[in-house]
Image (cartoon, grey):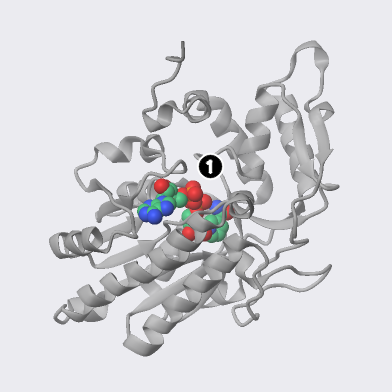
Amino acid sequence: MKIIVTGGAGFIGSAVIRHIIAHTNWHVINLDKLTYAGNLDSIGVAAYDARYSLARIDILDQEAVRSLLEREQPGAIMHLAAESHVDRSIDGPSAFIDTNITGTYRLLQEALNYWSGLNEPKKSAFRFHHVSTDEVFGSLGEIGLFREETPYRPNSPYSASKAASDHLVRSWHHTFGLPVVVTNCSNNYGPCQFPEKLIPLMIVRALEGKSLPLYGKGLNIRDWLFVDDHVRALLSVLQNGQLGQTYNIGGNAERRNIDIVESLCGLLDEMSPRANRLLYNELITFVTDRPGHDLRYAIDATKIREELSWQPQETFETGLRKTVQWYLDNETWWRRVLSGAYRGERLGLAG
Ligand code: NAD
């Protein structure tokens, strides 16, 4: 099996690649443009495996994608490449429209073109797996859960662009027969997450003794899943999911942002105490809320649990502890991100 993973230098994509190299005999091609969010450090030792290769390509570049598909003849494409940060989508939606919508469209066209030319049994075995988010469903009130048939009501430019890509993928299946599966997952956390997202941002800022800024009153609720549990779910859907179906993935771990940051502070007090008996939660501050901030997301993962026997291996507590430990053990990784060195930027040259 040879698989192309788009966005393989990102947070989740790199976890997918590390997992594939460690636990399968597949060959994996990392198709990534290497935006600010792409970090080859995150591939780790898997980067030195003969079954891994990097194709530095923008998914908007149809010709480059076409020649890669012709050359590599993959059995599957797992599509994770995206602009993924909600705050950035508010400040500058353009890249989200380009990559998430137009980029997905062009990738679909090339996948369709390639798949149409395949002979059996490769044709029937081929899969295009589109990786998406629960944010496409909009915001929940105090009760209720997102199910696969929940209507789409995206509220941010990010979620709207992901919703559009989900619809394109669905239609390429329905209209052209492209063999697709789609997954919509809740908020992920874990090793190698760019420190602009809530959990790594708070860990890194706390370790640097900086304020821990929470939007509004910190009462927004997300349903959290440890990234390796997401990866296991993705591989399960890729291999055993029904064609044309979507699967919700979630950890059944709803937490308010304030509770998460309090938990992180408690873990850090234990695992990396501050000097002079200061407590980390003294660093918490409240800042003006994000515009249009969705109140609550929560996933009903019954379908993937019942059909594919997937369930998370980590609880929120075990996953959060592992995550804090990882950031403590991998200061070089996040310092290289903060300094820009991970992108090969030359720093410290200003006169
Ligand atoms: P990320 O921002 O960490 O990584 C995105 C990767 O895509 C980067 O390596 C980047 O270089 C690459 N990329 C961006 N634009 C590209 C382009 N035009 N061509 C090729 N590569 C490009 O994202 P992530 O958090 O790992 O998320 C991966 C996917 O999973 C996204 O599609 C996201 O919508 C989805 N998702 C994320 C979460 C989450 O909590 N992080 C939850 C559910 C779904």
Q: How many marks?
A: 1
Nearer to the camera, 160 or 214: 160
Residue that sits furthest to the bottom in the current view: 175
The crowding category of the residue bearing disc 1, from other C-alpha atoms within 10 Å (few below 14, some 14 to 19, many at least 20), is many
Nearer to the camera, 168 or 316: 168
Q: Residue at x 49, y 63 (%)?
A: 97
Q: Residue at x 34, y 60 (%)?
A: 60
Residue that sits furthest to the front in the current view: 351
Nearer to the camera, 311 or 16: 16
Left or right: residue 166 versus residue 28 is right
Residue 335 location (% of width, % of height): 51, 25
Q: Residue at x 75, y 25 (%)?
A: 269
Can the viewer see residue 243 in this picture? no
What is the quadrant of the N terminus in the image?
Answer: bottom left
Q: Taking 84 as reference, is 132 above or below it?
A: below
Q: Amino acid at mark 1?
A: Gln
Q: Taking 182 as reference, is 90 above or below it?
A: above
Residue 105 location (% of width, % of height): 38, 71
SS class, disc 1: loop
Left or right: residue 136 versus residue 36 is right
Left or right: residue 304 versus residue 261 is left
Q: Residue at x 83, y 48 (%)?
A: 216
Q: Taking 342 as reference, is 317 above or below it?
A: below
Quadrant in the picture for residue 196: top right
Can the viewer see residue 95 in this picture? yes
Check disc 1 and report the residue beneath it.
Answer: 193
Nearer to the camera, 346 or 286: 346
**Cβ(mark 1) to ligand 1 < 8 Å?**
yes
